[in-house]
């Protein structure tokens, strides 16, 4: 499931604890230019020249596999997105368009028909066929270990209905399904290759067989993964200019920053916050920020306890200095969230959600008086219950936790901050036994696609991976929205859901939206600054500067 809690964006950033306590204890104390005024870039200047080799660092370290069906996090997706393509594509401006499927139709509410491109080949020269597409979709439908299996819940059958046509039949109308094919729910792999290699696909010795602009070459474990340009790539508007991509796995902030400044690393997404000032001041390259459907939120994990009271949830939300956290803890990359869904994921509901966001938006500064007023109506025995927050043991997340605790202390709540090893933190998210009666969990979340129904389905609907409290308050509205064909009617339903979540301050406390960032040395340019590197062939934009 798309999320991250240990990215290099947050690893190793060292704001002093004392200064953070000052920040969180002073409402509106932040000074300087708000990050909301920062000019965001979607596409960096286009690359024009041919380049023999680019070394790009993968900030989260070495992947476990490059099998796209097992790929749902920053590291594998940043690499796989240049190799394995989907039936639909999500572009750097967050649009969803046909891709390996040249077109699609929806002749009735239970049927989606996909006309496939006929000019696509796999790297071994074999043409992509309807059989490959059926196999790939069936893999997601039947393999319970695929990260995208749950998106096929409404699929009844997948059938080849022509030489270049595939028809999907549904058990119930699902107007989210088609767009989800812009994630690896719609990935297309070569059937012959998977039949031959089975569970070895994705391993260093076998790799993958896909249709993208770069082909799998070598994986030197512990060191790098190398991709080479596929010269017969079908999409002539994205003809790669870089012959070889070497992905390295440095995770230490100082090492990454040093590598970028020395030229040993040509570029990276999410350059270390600890090195941000050095990189921005350097003459060796350029630093860009771009829009992203990313948000740091606090997940309400316990349906009982003090946070079962809506006034307690709302009071804590009002007391947290999200403005200061975004500026000081996240190095200016964070801006306070208006809604539980990040604004870059508003999609078809953009206008409606923009209007709602404008109505409920604050500047993110703490509102202690308003919070205390809400708590005045809370029974004493409820206020006396301890509220626990668990965060991973990294400098930035610990500082976030301290800021939340400081806010709770300031309004008289009994608050317990627990810091656990980063390597085991995911157990709190996914294992109820580990989580126990923990009240709040930290997460940095991104959706499969820029669509609010995808975000809500994962975070706020029964069965959603990030709905740890089992919240069910919008289930009926969500089911109605997914089955509604008209965009405007569906947008109205989404807005009702977001309004309800805002009123109830559950199952997440909105925190900050996080911008994407990218650094490239002066040799190269072109990588999208927008957060589009997890399912789209971003490296095909790279090129030389001369």
Image (cartoon, rainbow, N blue to C red):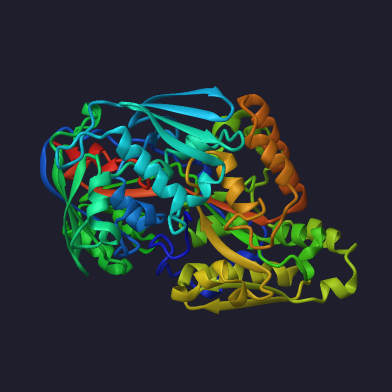
> Going 52% across and 78% down the picture, which residue do you hit?
420
Q: Is residue 301 above or below residue 43?
A: below
Q: Is residue 452 left or right of residue 118?
A: right
Q: Residue furthest left?
A: 52
Measuring from the top left, give residue 154's x and y in whole percent. Answer: 57, 42
Q: Quadrant of residue 223?
A: bottom left
> Going 51% across and 45% down the picture, which residue do you hit?
152
Mark yes or no: residue 83 visible: no
Pick the front one: 154 or 521: 154
Pick the front one: 14 or 463: 463
Q: Is residue 429 left or right of residue 369?
A: left
Q: Is residue 376 left or right of residue 520?
A: right
> Going 28% across and 52% down the picture, which residue do you hit?
79
Q: How many marks?
A: 0
Mark yes or no: residue 455 visible: yes
Q: Is residue 355 above or below residue 287?
A: above
Q: Is residue 456 left or right of residue 5?
A: right
Q: Quadrant of residue 12?
A: bottom left
Q: Is residue 259 above or below residue 387?
A: above
Measuring from the top left, give residue 354's x and y in whole percent. Answer: 62, 34
Measuring from the top left, give residue 92's x and y in whole percent. Answer: 38, 36
Pick the front one: 418 or 398: 418
Measuring from the top left, give residue 41's x and y in whole percent. Answer: 39, 37
* Quadrant containing the C terminus in the rendered view: top left
Q: Quadrant of residue 97?
A: top left
> Going 66% across and 71% down the picture, which residue do you hit?
405
């Amino acid at each position: 499931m798309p999320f991250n809690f240990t990215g290099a964006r947050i690893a190793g950033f060292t704001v002093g604890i004392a200064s953070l306590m000052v920040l969180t204890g002073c409402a509106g104390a932040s000074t300087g230019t708000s990050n909301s005024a920062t000019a965001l870039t979607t596409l960096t200047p286009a690359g024009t020249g041919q380049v023999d080799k680019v070394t790009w660092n993968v900030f989260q370290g070495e992947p476990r596999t490059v099998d796209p069906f097992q790929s749902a996090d920053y590291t594998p997706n940043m690499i796989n997105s240049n190799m394995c393509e989907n039936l639909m594509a999500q572009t750097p401006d967050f649009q969803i368009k046909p891709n390996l499927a040249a077109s699609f139709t929806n002749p009735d509410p239970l049927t989606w028909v996909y006309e496939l491109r006929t000019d696509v080949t796999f790297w071994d020269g074999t043409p992509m066929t309807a059989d490959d597409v059926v196999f790939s979709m069936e893999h997601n439908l039947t393999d319970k270990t695929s990260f995208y299996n749950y998106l096929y819940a409404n699929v009844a059958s997948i059938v080849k209905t022509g030489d270049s046509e595939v028809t999907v039949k549904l058990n119930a109308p699902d107007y989210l399904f088609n767009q989800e094919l812009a994630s690896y729910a719609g990935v297309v792999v070569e059937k012959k290759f998977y039949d031959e290699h089975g569970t070895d696909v994705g391993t260093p010795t076998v790799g993958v067989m896909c249709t993208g602009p770069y082909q799998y070459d070598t994986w030197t474990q512990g060191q790098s993964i190398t991709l080479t340009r596929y010269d017969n790539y079908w999409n002539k508007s994205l003809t790669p200019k870089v012959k070889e991509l070497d992905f390295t796995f440095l995770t230490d902030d100082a090492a990454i920053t040093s590598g970028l400044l020395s030229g040993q690393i040509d570029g990276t997404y999410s350059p270390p916050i600890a090195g941000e000032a050095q990189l921005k001041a350097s003459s060796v390259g350029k630093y860009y920020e771009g829009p992203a459907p990313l948000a740091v939120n606090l997940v309400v994990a316990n349906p009982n306890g003090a946070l079962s009271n809506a006034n307690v949830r709302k009071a804590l939300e009002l007391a947290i200095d999200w403005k200061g956290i975004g500026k000081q803890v996240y190095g200016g990359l964070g801006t306070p969230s208006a809604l539980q869904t990040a604004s870059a994921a508003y999609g078809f509901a953009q206008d409606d959600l923009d209007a709602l966001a404008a109505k409920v938006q604050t500047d993110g500064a703490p509102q202690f008086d308003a919070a205390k007023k809400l708590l005045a109506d809370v029974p004493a025995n409820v206020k006396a219950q301890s509220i626990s927050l668990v965060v991973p043991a990294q400098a930035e997340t610990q500082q976030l936790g301290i800021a939340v605790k400081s806010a709770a202390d300031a309004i008289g709540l009994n608050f317990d901050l627990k810091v656990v090893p980063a390597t085991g933190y995911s157990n709190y998210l996914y294992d109820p036994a580990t989580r126990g009666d923990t009240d709040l969990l930290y997460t940095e979340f991104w959706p499969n696609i820029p669509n609010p129904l995808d975000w809500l389905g994962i975070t706020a609907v029964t069965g959603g991976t990030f709905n740890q409290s089992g919240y069910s308050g919008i289930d009926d509205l969500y089911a109605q929205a997914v089955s509604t064909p008209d965009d405007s009617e569906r947008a109205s339903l989404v807005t009702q859901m977001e309004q309800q979540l805002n009123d109830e301050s559950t199952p997440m406390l909105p925190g900050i939206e996080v911008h994407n960032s990218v650094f490239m040395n002066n040799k190269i340019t072109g990588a999208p600054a927008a957060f589009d590197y997890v399912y789209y062939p971003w490296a095909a934009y790279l090129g030389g500067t001369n």
